[in-house]
Structure formats: structure tokens, C-alpha cells
Image (cartoon, grey):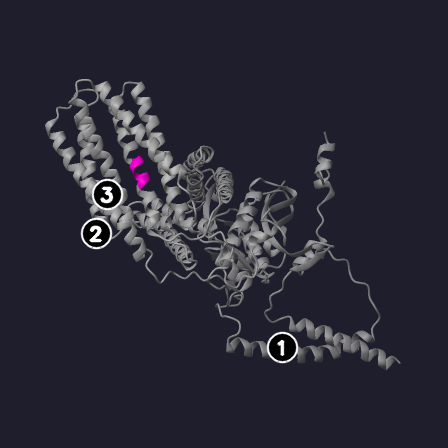
Amino acid sequence: MSIKKNTSKIFVYTIIITLTLSMGFPVIVTATTPGTIYDDTLSLEYRNMTVYVPAVGQTEQGNSGVISTITVTIQSNGSGRVFVDTLSLAQVDMQGSARLAVKVASSLVSNDENCTIDPSTFDYFFVIRTKSPIIGGPSAGGIMTATVVALLEGWEMDEHTVMTGMINPDGSIGPIGGIPYKIDAAASVGATRFLIPEGQMTYTEIVTETVPLPNGWNQYQKTVTRNVSDYAMENYGMEVIEVTDINDVLRYYTGYYFPVIASEHSISTQDYLNSMKPLATNLLDQATESYQKAQQSFDKTTIPNRFPYYYRNQVTDFLNDAEDTLQTSQDWFDNELYYTSTSYSFQSLINSQFVEYICTYYNTENQATYVNDLFSNASQLFETKSNEAKNTAINGAISLQCVGAAQKRATEAASYISSADTYIQESDYFSAIYYIARAIQRSESIGWWLGLKDYFNETNSFTTDELRDLANDYLLDAQQAIVYAGLILQEMGTSSAFLSDAQTMLDTAKNDNTNGYPAAALFEALEALSKANLALELVDATTEEKIQIRLDRANESASGSISESRLRGIEPILAVSYYEFAQSYVEENAQNALFYYKYSDLIPGVLTVTGICGTESSRFVGITQPNSPFRPFGSASSNQELFILILVSCLGGIAIGIVLGTVLSNSQEKKPSNITSWEPKSINDYAITYEPSKESYEDIPLSIEDYYKKD
């Protein structure tokens, strides 16, 4: 009987050790928990995953690294809602980070042809648990995004990788602080790889040095630059890797990535060129004729030129600007950038028209009457054209773009009419005439855009209710983006002109939506969203190299979105126009180029709201092992190594199991010694075992009912 018992124990030990040793080769461990809930009428599917997130906590001794966990759950039969539950308390930006993470992740998954689900049909739950009294959201944005992608795609995540870094709206990983403290926190849970934002491999700290003097000692402080990678490797044997965007993060966490493939076709197709060239030709001819008339009128007119206004000098500047922009228009026309050409022709027309009007003004006896008549004509033209923009039917994606552009120009013309009226009331006729010229040319451009829809076949369809809902959705998105960007910039102690511009544009969009211009409101909301996003994305774009990287990424993304739209049978006229405009700014003004690329990138998403999968596939290349060159699993060499590791593990396990089983079976059972420290072996261990200190949280309400009981 005892022989049988010993044999049984030896067998058990052999199996345990064999399995233990076999775990030595690289595997991907996940904390994913899938499930389904049923009742009589509804089936809810859910998946969840818990990940480590390092944070910086404040103690009596100063700052220290604190490990936190975020459990992300996705649930079917949802509508894209995002819920956040935190203990301890979270800053407001945690909610913004969660929403942004879902948006970026959903965008990636929606464009994956391997996808079998629509991200907008899920609800998203983020449960944050931390020992830090207050946790901020930005530095957790990257890992939250990666986790949502993994859950939607059904991928596993490596438990031995930890990261810090905010997620930007374009998928890039933004800067954060406290990296050394966060490395300490990551080491406490056995991390072997730590991901940080690109460009943050060094940090500075203040050190105190003591220097001997003849009569004593002198202490002074100095700033020293340290290397993050050296710190992690020397203290914990941990590898630190810089990541540029969410694709890098996914590659190290899951082994998958989304390839960015540039369009093989020209962005300006022949159909697009055929639609834009007649307009560009017509405007260039008008601008040329208008400039020649303005030059002749100017030569024949006596314009006052005395202190303090020097009107003739000012008019000369306008005439020179008209000539310069006319030449620029011709240059872009010759390069077949027809939308850019029309934009410069438009500016030339405004300046030439103003010179003509002002010359007539100085040659007229009753100048006030002339200005009032001119204003009346401009107002009538505006009323006629704006009514056309308001009443033109929107039947699909083509008319949505053309009518949207026309309505936006109607809004701009209205603001010029208002400014002209104000200056007339103040008897500032010089300024009034300038805004009248702008209002007239802007009103004329309404007709240009409405006419473009006839060059293309209508695709998709939009009802009035769908358009209104779409505009409201993007207005809300823009508002949230502005608030979130404002919070983050405030925390960083910086500001951005893009953010104030975004708020101004959002206000305009809200007014247009109220005043019956829903298509204009939609595209203005996109502009506001683009500018709010850029306010964040440009925070760390401090060198020409970084700006160029962002330009290249924005160019690729916009190009891909345009190509994707065309593959779905929708011609993104507006997107192509602004993409072209962005190219004209690349050398002159990189920030403007970035904005127009970003705006161009967002437009196709509005036109293709069908929710169908994209045309590019996610790819699996395997998770890079720490301190080893990147090599995809599945290669011949890695398969051979894997077989050898398994064979050695099994043989070693059998041998050690037999010996250990024999020894232990003949020894008496001993009680384990007291454990003074504990390190979780998996994310599940941490999530189950961790309980906040009662002393730390006794005053924190556990529910909304408890919160109100306090009062």
C-alpha cells in the first residue's frame, strides 16, 4: 500500500514539475474572461481583461511608484457608451482618456477586414483600482486603447509588459512624467519590459554634492541627466522600449499590428480634376481681369495719403497682394492643384474688388450713399445665395459635401455682412468696403460649390433626421475633445492657439446648427475636432524631425482614408480638396499643413457611416521577447528552439520529479515559514488579492447613496 502511495506522489510531483519547467518557454498569458448572459429575450456577450498600470503616488516621504489595475469589459448589445468606475478617486481626465481610448481603438478595428464585429454595438466599462489616493488618466490612455483593441479583436496580451503613455487622437503615444517611479511600480509585479513614449529615454533629477573646502564643507545642488533604460536594467533587469504609436504598443503586447499601406493611386483622380479644373480656370480668368481693372482704376484715382491713415499706401498694399496671390494661383494651377489655385484666386479677387470699390468711393461725390447702395447689393446677393445653400436638398454623400461647403461659406458671408454693417454705423467706410468685398466674393463662392455636385454620381443617402443626428454627434465629440485637451494642457502648464480656435469654430457650428445649416455645422464640428486634437498632438512636437514625423503620418492617414472612401464607391470631394491644400502648406507652414491633413482625414469617416469592415488586415508577427531581436513566431528557427525547450523541460521534469517525490514522500510535513513579502505571479493574483487599506479609504463613499448620506 505504501509503495502505491509513494508511486502516486512521485507521479504527481513529476507532472507538476514537468508543467512548471515547460512554462519556461515564451508564451502569451492573458487575463481575458469571456462569457454570455441569457434571459428569455436577450443574450449579452461580454469579454474582460485586467492590465497593470503604473502611477505616481504621494507619500510622507515624497513621490513613489504605485501599481494600479484597470479591468476593461466590453459588452454586446450596446451603443458605444463608456463607463468608468474608480477607487480611489480619479481625476476628470480619466473619463476623457477612456472615451478617447475607445474612439481610437474602434477606428482601428473598424478598418480591419478581419473584424467580425462593429465596435459601435458594444458598451465599454473601465474599473480602476489603485493604492494612489488620486489617479490621473492621460498616462493610462495607451494601455486602455491597446486593451480595448485586444478585446474587440479577441487577442491575448503579454502580462510581463507594462507601459505608460497617453493616447493621442491620431493613435500616437503622447508624453507623460514620473517614468522612474513607474518603473519601480512595474518591477513590483514582475514586469520584464516597460514601454515609454518616444523621446523620453532620459530624465533629470537634482542631486546634492558635498565639496571639501579648506575651512569646512560646501554643499550644492545640480541637475543631472539620467538614462531611463540604464536605470531599469541596472535595478531590475528590465528592458525599456520607446513606442511611437498604438501599433508599436500592440506589437509588443499582442504580437499583432495594423499595417499602414499608402495609396497606390493618385489622390487627385481624373474625375476630381475634371470637376475642379473648370472652376479653377474660371476663377483665375476672373481674378486676372479684376486685377487689371483695379490697376487701371488705381492709376486714375486720387486717394488721400496723410497722417494718420495714409489710405493710398494701404490701397497699394491690397493691390500688391492681389498681384502676388494671382501669381500664386497661376503657379498652383500649372501644377494641377486646382483647389489650391481657386483659394488664391478667391483671395486675389477680394483684394482687387476692394481696390475697385475704394477707387469708385473716392471718385464719388456722395460717398455715404455709394457705400449704402453697395452694402444693399451685397446683402441682396447674400440672401439669394444663402437661401440656395439652405434649401438645396441633400440626397447623399456628394450633395452633403457640396451643400456643407456652400452653407459654411454662407455663414462666413453672413459674418462679413455683419462686420460691414457695424463699420457703416461707425462711418468707417474704408473698413466697411473691405468687408463688403469679402461678403460679395464669399456669396459668389456658394454657387461654385453647389455646382460641383453635378459632376459626380450621388452615392449613399442621408435623411434629414440622420444628418441632424450626425451633426449633433460630432458637435458633442468636438466639445469633449476641447474639454479634454484643455485639462491636459492645463496640467502640463502650456496652452495652444489651436484650442482657442477650436472653441471659436465649435461656437460657430452650434449657431449654424440652430440657424438651419446642419451640413455646415457638421463640417465645422469636424474642424473644431481636428484643431482640438492637434492642440494635444503638437505638445511634444518640439523639433523639425518630430514635426516631419507627424506630417508623414498625417499624410499617410489622410491618403488611406480617401482611398478607403473611394473603394466604398464614395468620392470624398472635400477631403481631396483639403488634402491638396495641406500639400501646398507643407513647406510654408507645417502646422497649417497638419491641420488640413487631419481635417481631410476625418471627412471620409462622416461619408462612410455604414459600419462595414475596412480593406486592410491586421497581421500577427509574434511578441518580441525582452532583450532579443524582433523575430516572428512561426519561423523555422523559433519552432526548432520551441521543440527543444519542450523536450528538455519534459525530460528534466520527469527526472527531478522522481527524485523530489522520493525525498518528500519519506519526510515529515513541515509548516511553511512566515512570508514577509508577496509578489503576484499573474494579473489575476493581483486583482483578487489586492484590497485597499481601510484607513486610507474609510471616508470614501462606496456608492452614490453613501455619498448623499454624508450630507
Kindly identify which numbered label has been placed on residue 334: 2
Measured as percent of width and height from the top left, residue 588 is found at 28, 46
* Residue type for callout 3: Leu
Residue tagged by mark 1?
Answer: 646
Quadrant the C terminus occupies? top right
Figure check: 21 above or below 415: below
* Residue type for callout 2: Asp
Q: What whole-number distance in Å separates the C-alpha atoms at marks 3 and 2? A: 14 Å
Measured as percent of width and height from the top left, residue 449 is found at 33, 43
Q: Is residue 166 magenta?
A: no
Labels 1 and 2 touching (C-beta < 8 A):
no
The numbered mark, 3 or 1, whose residue comes first in the sequence reads 3
The numbered mark, 3 or 2, whose residue comes first in the sequence reads 3
Location of residue 504 by image quarter: top left
Q: Which residues are magenta?
A: 442-447
Report the side of 443 relative to 637 (left or right): left
Q: Is residue 443 magenta?
A: yes
Quadrant the N terminus occupies? bottom right
Q: 192 or 207, which is in the foreground?
A: 192
